[in-house]
Image: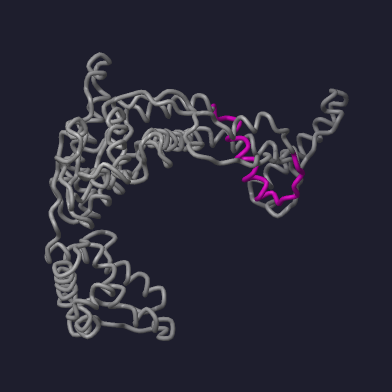
């Protein structure tokens, strides 16, 4: 995990997300506590449990975006799941334990990438030697140790070809290599099959015969194939699995979105039965249990859980008391104001205005947004959110598409040009739609 301080984590998040300082601070502290725990003595480390976080706020204010950016920052195993994907055990659908299996798969990917980097130099050297064997086959006399001059002549030739290979002079020459073709078994599907703890693919690979094929490739293409083969041969899969499980158990983060959608209503039939069951099934996972995966047993005691929900129709207190207690840190994210919309349009590294300028710039069209146009766009976004369904920052996507629809259509025919967008242009494109409340519901 990257050794970022809470202040550095917040600064990184500020580059992409406007406002919501309380949520950023809570997440930053939780991530730093993971780093602190790793430096405790073994006896104390086992006692320190993660302080899970629940983010509460309307849609489109940055809950999911914080999670996405966090995943890139930490370098730790991280998955984002929707609570609505899961059903109670016994119902058709996915059970909550599958999120732990997904976390382990994510950890496997991270560890494999590190292992690939570690063995890449050796794998490249071995791949080059195999390429030389293909370009300059060893004569039989060398293997049997017969004539010394033949061996010497062979070494000189090999040295010459090595120099040519390093200089890139043989990239287009064709060689023939052997590639193993794995038989793809026809997989049957059924309820709960994906949650089986048996690695069916590995089982079938052992049962089915291995097929090899000869492929005629250029040296450049063959080098890539041979490099992959050598990397696979050098990586110890059992070591990767063990490291991944340890990484997932100690540094893993699971972001559960839409947690409010598993709050059951007063009725005791229909989907509400399963929703209440999902909460019951989530409880031991968050509390700390052991889940069986195809790579081994995984303890969830020290996995950090971050839950998020809009809680429009329900309140966090409607969740099971036991589940509420497992999310001790609660952070409220506020609704976006007009000033927030102005900042969203201009400040972040990936701001919408910058995205559209870059997109139209590929057509040779320079788009300039005047400050009054930004102010006007923010006013429309805030107004439409207030008068219809409040969807937060996502409203800006629909407004920007509506604003630039004509320009995006005409841009390829303009070839070159400079377009200045001011408040008058914004009003011309959006005023009629925004004023008609019924129409804005469908268009904006």
| Residue 172, above or below 125 | below
Which residues are the magenta region?
212-236
* x and y percentages locating residue 303 in the rendered image: 30, 30
Would you say residue 235 sits in the magenta stretch?
Answer: yes
In the rendered image, is residue 72 in sight? no
Q: Residue at x 22, y 66 (%)?
A: 345
Name of the residue lying farthest toward the top: 43
Observer-nearest of 123 and 89:
89
Query: Toward which corner of the image does residue 87 lie, by quadrant?
Result: top left
Query: Toward which corner of the image does residue 70 lie, by quadrant?
Result: top left
* x and y percentages locating residue 199 in the rendered image: 55, 31
Q: Residue at x 40, y 39 (%)?
A: 91
Observer-nearest of 352 and 132:
352
Observer-nearest of 403 and 285:
285
Would you say residue 15 sits in the magenta stretch?
Answer: no
In the rendered image, is residue 362 in sight? yes
Q: Residue at x 30, y 40 (%)?
A: 273
| Residue 250, above or below 189 | above
* x and y percentages locating residue 99 in the rendered image: 38, 37
State the predominant SS element of the stretch in magenta.
helix
* x and y percentages locating residue 222 in the rendered image: 68, 46
Quarter of the rendering occupied by the C terminus: bottom left
> Along the horizontal axis of the image, is 313 left or right of 282?
left
């Amino acid at each position: 995990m990257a050794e970022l301080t809470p202040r550095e984590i917040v600064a990184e998040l500020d580059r992409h997300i406007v406002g919501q300082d309380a949520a950023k601070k809570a997440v930053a502290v939780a991530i730093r506590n993971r780093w602190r725990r790793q430096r405790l003595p073994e006896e104390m480390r086992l006692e320190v449990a993660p302080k899970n976080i629940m983010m509460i706020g309307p849609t489109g204010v940055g809950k999911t975006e914080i999670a996405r950016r966090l995943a890139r920052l930490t370098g730790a195993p991280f998955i984002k799941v929707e609570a609505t994907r899961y059903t109670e055990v016994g119902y058709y659908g996915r059970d909550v334990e599958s999120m732990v299996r997904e976390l382990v798969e994510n950890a496997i990917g991270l560890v494999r990438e590190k292992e690939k980097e570690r063995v890449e130099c050796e794998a490249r050297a071995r791949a080059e030697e195999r390429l030389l064997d293909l370009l300059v086959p060893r004569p039989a006399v060398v293997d049997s140790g017969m004539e010394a001059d033949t061996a010497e002549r062979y070494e000189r030739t090999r040295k010459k070809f090595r120099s040519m290979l390093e200089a890139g002079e043989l990239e287009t020459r064709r060689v023939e290599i052997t590639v193993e073709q794995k038989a793809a078994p026809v997989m049957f599907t059924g309820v709960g099959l994906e949650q089986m703890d048996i690695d069916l693919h590995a089982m079938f690979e052992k049962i089915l015969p291995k097929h090899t094929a000869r492929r005629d490739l250029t040296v450049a293409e063959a080098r890539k194939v041979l490099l992959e083969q050598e990397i696979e041969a050098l990586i110890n899969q059992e070591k990767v699995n063990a490291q991944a499980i340890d990484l997932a158990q100690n540094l893993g983060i699971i972001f559960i979105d839409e947690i409010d959608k598993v709050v059951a209503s007063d009725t005791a039939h229909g989907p509400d039965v399963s929703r209440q069951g999902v909460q019951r099934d989530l409880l031991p996972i968050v509390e700390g249990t052991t889940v069986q995966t195809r790579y081994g047993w995984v303890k969830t005691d020290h996995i950090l859980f971050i839950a998020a929900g809009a809680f429009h129709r329900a309140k966090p207190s409607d969740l099971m008391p036991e589940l509420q207690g497992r999310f001790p840190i609660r952070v409220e994210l506020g609704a976006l104001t007009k000033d927030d919309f102005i900042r969203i349009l201009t400040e972040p590294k990936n701001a919408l205005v910058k995205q559209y300028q870059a997109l139209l710039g590929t057509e040779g069209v320079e788009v300039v947004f005047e400050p009054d146009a930004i102010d006007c766009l923010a006013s429309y976004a805030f107004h439409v959110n207030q008068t219809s369904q409040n969807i937060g920052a996502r409203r800006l996507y629909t407004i920007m598409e509506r604003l630039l629809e004509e320009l995006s259509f005409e841009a390829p025919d303009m070839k070159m040009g400079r377009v200045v967008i001011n408040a008058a242009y914004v009003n011309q494109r959006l005023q009629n739609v925004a004023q008609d409340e019924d129409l804005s519901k469908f268009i904006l």
